[in-house]
Image (cartoon, grey):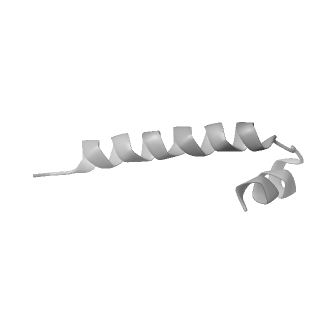
Amino acid sequence: MLGDNIEATYGNTLSPSALKDLAERFQQRHTAEMEEDHIA
């Protein structure tokens, strides 16, 4: 789970809402980068 990995790596515990926000931001960034790299 993302929260478990962040806690194990950085020692920080994030709230469920913070984890949701982080995951959504990552997904948006990933999608944008995939679109930039796509060659039609």
Q: Position of residue 33 (x, y in %)?
A: 36, 43
What residue is rendered at 44% in x and 40% in y?
A: 28
Q: To which quarter of the image does residue 17 belong?
A: top right
Q: Position of residue 5 (x, y in %)?
A: 77, 58
What residue is rendered at 43% in x and 47% in y?
A: 30
Q: Position of residue 7 (x, y in %)?
A: 85, 52
Horizontal side, residue 4 vs residue 22: left or right = right
Q: Residue furthest left?
A: 40
Q: Is residue 23 above or below residue 9?
A: above
Residue closer to the observer: 39 or 28:
28
> On the rendered image, what quadrant is the N terminus found in?
bottom right
Q: Is residue 24 above or below residue 6?
A: above
Horizontal side, residue 26 vs residue 28: left or right = right
What residue is rendered at 37% in x and 46% in y?
A: 31
Q: Position of residue 18 (x, y in %)?
A: 72, 37
Horizontal side, residue 3 vs residue 20: left or right = right
Q: Residue furthest front?
A: 17
What residue is rendered at 27% in x and 42% in y?
A: 36
Q: To which quarter of the image does residue 14 belong?
A: top right
Residue closer to the observer: 17 or 33:
17
Q: How many marks?
A: 0
Horizontal side, residue 25 vs residue 28: left or right = right
